[in-house]
Amino acid sequence: MRGSSCVSLALLAVVLLCGAPNSVSAQGVDPQALKQEIDALRTEFETIKKQYGDRLAALESKLGSAQPAAEVAQVPSPSPTGSTTPTANVFNPDMAVIGDFLGAAGRNRVAPSPAFEMHESEVSLQAVVDPYARADFFIAFGQEGVELEEGFITFPTLPGGVLLRAGKMRAAFGKINGLHNHVLSWTDRPLVTTNLVGGEEGISDAGISVARLIPNPWLFLEATGQVFRGDSGELFQSNRPRDLTYVGHLRAYHDITESTNLDLGASYARGQNNAAASESIDGRFATGLVGIDATLRWKPLQRSIYHSFVGRSELVWSRREQPIGTARAFGFYASGDYQFARRWFAGLRYDAAERADDASIRDRGQSATLTYWPSEFSQIRSQYRRIRYADADTANEVLFQFQFSIGAHGAHPF
Amino acid sequence: MLIKPSFVAVTLGLAMFCAAGAQAQGRVNVMTTTEDLAAIAREVGGDRVTVESIARGYQDPHFVEAKPSYILKLQKADLLVVVGRELEIGWLPPLIQQSRNAKVQVGAPGYLDASLRARILEIPQGQVTRASGDVHPQGNPHYWLDPENGKAIAKAIGEKLGDLRPGDRTFFDGRVADFSKRVDEGEKRWLATLAPYKGAKVVTYHRSFPNFAERFGLTVIDYVEPKPGIPPSPQHTLDLINEIKQQNVKVILVEPYFDLKTPNSIGQSTGAQVLVMPPSVGGVKAVTDYFSLFDYNVGLLATALQKSGAAGGR
């Protein structure tokens, strides 16, 4: 209180000082003007005095009311959050953290994995924004730092059946590019992703996405168009603001029976690559990607928690313009995952992918996985992986993974 | 400048199209998450609604897949009725979000949480953690298995349909009253059938039957699952066998979507009968509506308890 009165006095002095030169200069001019000036100053002074008086009174009453509140807070409260009422948390977003712990044993000279690694801790924050939109944030804490994995606003109810998204997001290229690590059937991503589709980050960038259902009497058909800033790891690199990345995706889904369904997709992506920047030459070099994906799922409804099968394949063709000519590369993976008991899954994957900048280098890999689910909220997985690198020693590794989630119950991906 | 008038025209056209759609007084297109809600919605809506359920009655309603074909169904819905209490939390939110249907978004006029007026049991007290398994913090979502709650659900659906079609409000109110009357009659019958076995002890696989047990005087002493959502463990199964023997439990109730291996082996070691008891309409072929759900289950239980000579709680 003493402090604030000092401040008000100091301010008063400043006001008086500022006013002084004016009054001095006015002295010899006109007594009428001088009187007016003094009146004005007096009014100003009274106003400021009143303002500070009011503010002091408000502060005093605030302090007074804070006193008993502080006493209440000292009383042991059953709620761990102290004096906050449950209603204060009503509008907090749904929060969850998913931990992904990886271990590796074996030999890999090309891309060696550390023996132990807290690969990623993903924090998700999700809530409805207002009657028109919802927001989703996924923040990934990795070994090297923190990254906004995704953060976007979704407008789910625009006219014309359009689903609009804006923000940073994983692009709708193929199937697994859009998926987060923790929902994959493996501890890693297939070679085709590493070699052709931007590695673990994949195509993930800031931009706008528009998705619309195409009405027809036969099947679920959804077309998605996306425009991004143009920076996706090493895959796309924007050298000027106009260098955008474009992604298009068409998805067709059909229930063959109540337990079997087929999910097909075709994707296209195009953007500027890093060929010009990395070799510091002028020119514009684009990378175009075409992808086809197919997923066959089987899950008998009455025994849905015990048995299921997912077979999936993605084929990607890359066309990368480079100073030395255009490189055309191809890669694919095919995988099958079978759930043979309520908590057990076994899977196989075959990988083959040429390198984006040199199609004569073709890597091949095979993986076998075994996954155990102690509960819906944790998962233990082991993966044997053999990669025959075209230009290096064959890698043989055993990878294992603990995955665990706390917080809000997220939706299961489909 | 030239774009503007055409843009306005398109917007106006869309608005008129939407308005025309809303005015067309066809049947109300009702989607429900489960077949029980669908059965009640059919009773209430009669021929002025079309009703379809996302989950089948013989499917575990906690683990439904969010198939895109459901998105198409939700896209056309005027009303979405959900069980609530986080039963559908693992699969419904992405479906609603992708439905592009403003009517059925959470909180919109076409979204109805059927649990809001029902009597909800097993609302956890004190600190809730997942150390207790997959608990539902808002209480047990299998509340439709009490006929009194069935009436509450019907009333909520009737009022909602009346809001959506004010012209048909009396029609829906009449049907709700008729449904409630028939439920009351049925309840008397079901209570009478099970009266001799009041207090009979049972074991169920999952916590699907607390409301049913409360209404019809059964005592659920334990579960085949050690904790909700956690599959049977050898130790718990052994403990359960001892408990069943000690307390002279005569029946083990298993939902149609659970594996019968463990319940059968418990049954063999204890002499208790294993009954596949559908918690939902459509769970078995004979159960086609809300009334046959109780007819079937009450009959099944009465027969089994009579055979075992368990004349209740002694």
Image (tube, helix red, strand yellow):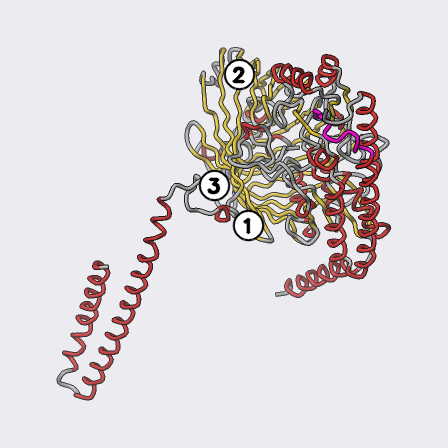
- In which quadrant of the rendered image does the C terminus of chain A lie? top right
Q: Tell me where residue B222 appears, x and y as whole percent.
A: 65, 25
Query: Closer to the camera: disc 3 or disc 1?
Result: 1
Query: Closer to the camera: disc 2 or disc 1?
Result: 1
For the residue marked with disc 1, what is the amino acid?
Val
Q: Chain of mark 1?
A: A
- Residue extending furthest front? B314
Quarter occupied by residue A146: top left
Q: Tell me where residue B214 appears, x and y as whole percent.
A: 70, 35
Q: Earlier in the sequence, mark 2 or mark 1?
A: 1
For the residue marked with disc 3, what is the amino acid?
Asn
Instruction: Examine the rendering and report whether any part of residue A346 can be seen.
Output: no
Q: Tell me where residue B14 appears, x and y as whole percent.
A: 72, 59
Residue sitting at x 65%, y 18%: B243
> Which label is found at residue B258?
none
Q: Is residue B170 above or below residue A327?
A: below
For the residues labelled 2 and 3, say whether their Cβ atoms are less than 8 Å apart: no
Quarter occupied by residue A179: top right
Q: Please give the range of residues in magenta.
A: B193-204
Residue named by callout 3? A239
Q: Tell me where residue A193 appears, x and y as whole percent.
A: 57, 26
Instruction: Examine the rendering and report whether any part of residue B306 can be seen.
Output: yes
Crowding at label 3, few (<14), some or many (≥20) Cα neighbours within 10 Å? some
Q: Earlier in the sequence, mark 2 or mark 3?
A: 3
* Spatial CA span between label 2 and label 1: 40 Å
Residue named by callout 2? A399
- In which quadrant of the rendered image does the N terminus of chain A lie? bottom left
Q: Earlier in the sequence, mark 3 or mark 1?
A: 1
Residue named by callout 1? A129
